[in-house]
Image (cartoon, rainbow, N blue to C red):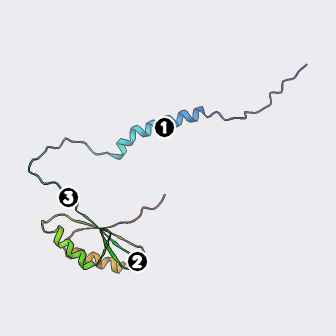
């Protein structure tokens, strides 16, 4: 006489339902991602034969902890930056945006002084680039 001992527990986890749910969620995210990224209304804009192409009007300036100023990867001085802003961008009354990237050890007074100099050239859009905090 043989006795079956069916007291053994489930030794493996069935992952099929987990895979099914994961694939359904992946499909939902793929379908809705386009709506999340681009929530604007699409319009078919009319074309013009006489309009000039809009050029990129952004100028990036970097200030290091040693108070070295860089523009377009080249070391320069604040006075040279101000002169270039006046000569290159503001002749036609364009809307220039100056973005400042600076080391966090740079004194606030130095950044404000540079921003004041940029303001005196006529630029109204000045931004300071920062890093996003990690979640």
Residue denoted by label 1: 25
Q: Residue 116 sits in which quadrant?
A: bottom left
In the image, is residue 105 above or below residue 98?
below
Which is nearer the eye, 87 or 134?
87
Precedes in sequence: disc 1 or disc 3 = 1
* Residue 85 in the figure: left or right of residue 15: left
Q: Nearer the viewer, mark 1 or mark 3?
A: 3
Precedes in sequence: disc 2 or disc 1 = 1
Picture coordinates of residue 129, whole percent (x, y): 35, 66
What's the residue at 26%, 43% (across, down)?
A: 41
Q: Which disc is residue 55 wearing?
A: 3
In the image, is residue 24 above or below residue 128?
above
Secondary-structure class at tag 3: loop
Q: Quadrant of the N terminus?
A: top right
The residue most toward the right is 1
What's the residue at 35%, 46% (across, down)?
A: 37
Marks 1 and 3 in Cβ contact (< 8 Å) = no
Q: Nearer the viewer, mark 2 or mark 1?
A: 2
* Residue 32 in the figure: left or right of residue 9: left
Gap in Å between the C-alphas at discs 1 and 3? 42 Å
- Local packing at callout 1 (Cα closer than 10 Å; few below 14, some 14-19, many 20+) is few
What's the residue at 38%, 66% (across, down)?
A: 130
Picture coordinates of residue 28, whole percent (x, y): 44, 37
Q: Residue 15 sits in which quadrant?
A: top right
Q: Which disc is residue 65 wearing?
A: 2
In the image, is residue 38 above or below residue 69?
above
Precedes in sequence: disc 3 or disc 2 = 3
* Residue 1 in the figure: left or right of residue 100: right
Gap in Å between the C-alphas at discs 2 and 1? 47 Å
Secondary-structure class at tag 1: helix
The residue most toward the left is 50
């Amino acid at each position: 006489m043989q006795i079956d001992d069916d007291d053994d527990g489930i030794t493996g986890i069935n992952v099929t339902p987990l895979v099914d749910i994961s694939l359904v969620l992946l499909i939902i995210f793929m379908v809705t991602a386009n709506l999340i990224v681009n929530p604007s209304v699409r319009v078919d804009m009319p074309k013009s034969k006489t309009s000039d192409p809009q050029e990129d009007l952004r100028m990036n300036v970097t200030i290091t902890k040693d108070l070295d100023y860089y523009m377009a990867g080249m070391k320069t001085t604040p006075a040279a930056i101000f002169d270039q802003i006046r000569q290159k961008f503001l002749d036609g009354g364009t809307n220039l945006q100056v973005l400042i990237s600076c080391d966090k050890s740079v004194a606030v007074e130095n950044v404000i002084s540079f921003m004041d100099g940029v303001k005196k050239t006529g630029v109204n859009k000045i931004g300071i680039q920062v890093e996003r905090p990690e979640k």
